[in-house]
Image: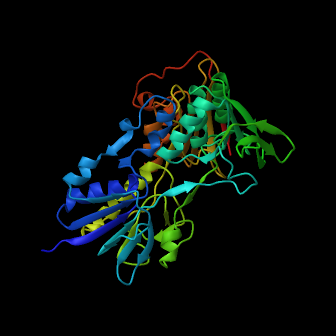
Amino acid sequence: MKRLKLVMIGNGMAGVRTLEELLKIAPDLYDITVFGAEPHPNYNRILLSPVLAGEQTFDDIVLNDLAWYAEHGIELRLGRKVLEIDRIRRQVIADDGSRAAYDRLLIATGSRPFMLPIPGNTLDGVIGYRDIADTRLMLDSATRHRRAVVIGGGLLGLEAAHGLKLRGMDVSVVHNGATLLERQLDERAGRLLQAALEHRGLHFALGKQTSELVGNAAGRISAVRFSDGGSLAADLVVMAAGIRPNIELAQRAGLPCARGILVDDTLQSFDPRIYAVGECVSHRGVAYGLVAPLFEQARVCASHLAMQGYRRYLGSLTSTKLKVTGIELFSAGDFAGGPGTQSITLDDPTTGSYRKLVLKNDVLVGACLYGDTADGAWYLQLIREGRNVAAIRDLLMFGEAAAAGQAPTVTDEPLLLQGAA
């Protein structure tokens, strides 16, 4: 049987994982062509932070080298950005004028950093943090400049700040929230994290709204100004204030988009020949930026591309970890606690360990851990299962081993509090 043509736009983690899953179940179904805007094979974008920190190299984070594509007969077109999808002729057109016909198209264009729309955001030395090119710019800046400002106190911003500090820069983190990682941690855990990072030499400007980036005579960033009149000197500014899905190509092709390319539970777009996965996707009103949901999407999408479509993607329950060596944190579910929930908190100042569990009707619905996160996976499993934990409620805080009948190990005087939300 003549092979069908599959074209993939984007060469990132979600898209290539979809190909890996597809090749497992239908290795001979398609002739595959991949367009990648970057000049690199597929790499682990999550590990850019350890590369910046000097803990790994660029070669260490390659997931699928060039030999992998060749081994599977995949035509890889690197450094080629697709500019147009012709849905009538079923072709894609790249920026070099080359074309590729498809029977099925997979869009995996990912996302880009959100650059604050403020004066000075195009100055030399103002960058986002998303790919190998950004990381190399940061490494180069660390050898030639001293003062860095990271805008954004989320996961990516803190990892960037930590890496730049290890590279010898004087680093300040600007965040408009009152605490760090407010979407992933409660206030207490956020304060503990801030104290740990300050101990490592980072500086923080919290509750600040960046209003302007100021340049010097040479056109390079020299200062960050705030709406309250304050400022910080800067030779490098890293924007880590969120991401935006790359949906413009899909929009030009007439595919419905909202916060991403709209897909159903099979990861199929409005056009039945076109699928989409990853950070460019909006599924049931949610766009995911963490790798676990994207890999779940990949498995489902691959089964349908293989024409063995029995799987459905129903959304993901996500959890959070920070990639800073020596700092352990974990959160999942409704860790803030809404109406009708009860929170149990264990705060041990001796070890710096903090746990908060949120229950509703004897079901664990959220967890926030700082310091000791060994039971994070178990708590996540309980949240996903939604099972009644009344029988182990009194031992739940002390982890899986305690709940299984082993004695809990705690310090002399931890603070254990219970309260209704």
Residue lying farthest right? 229
Front position in the image: 358 or 258 = 258
* Percent x, y of residue 94: 41, 68
Q: Residue at coordinates 66% horizontally, 24% vertically from top-left?
A: 201
Is 238 left, or right, of 266 in this rendering? right
The part of the image, by quadrant, that contains residue 411 is top right
The part of the image, by quadrant, that contains residue 165 is top right
Residue lying farthest top? 412
* Percent x, y of residue 371: 55, 27
Identify the coloring: rainbow
Tell me if residue 365 comes above or below residue 394 in the rendering.
Answer: below
* Percent x, y of residue 182: 66, 43
* Percent x, y of residue 326: 52, 25
Is 230 left, or right, of 363 in this rendering? right
Residue 159 in view here:
no
Count of labels in the image: 0
Residue lying farthest left? 1
* Image quadrant containing the N terminus: bottom left
Front position in the image: 79 or 260 = 79
Tell me if residue 292 comes above or below residue 100 in the rendering.
Answer: above
Is 235 left, or right, of 37 in this rendering? right
Front position in the image: 306 or 81 = 81
Residue lying farthest bottom? 88
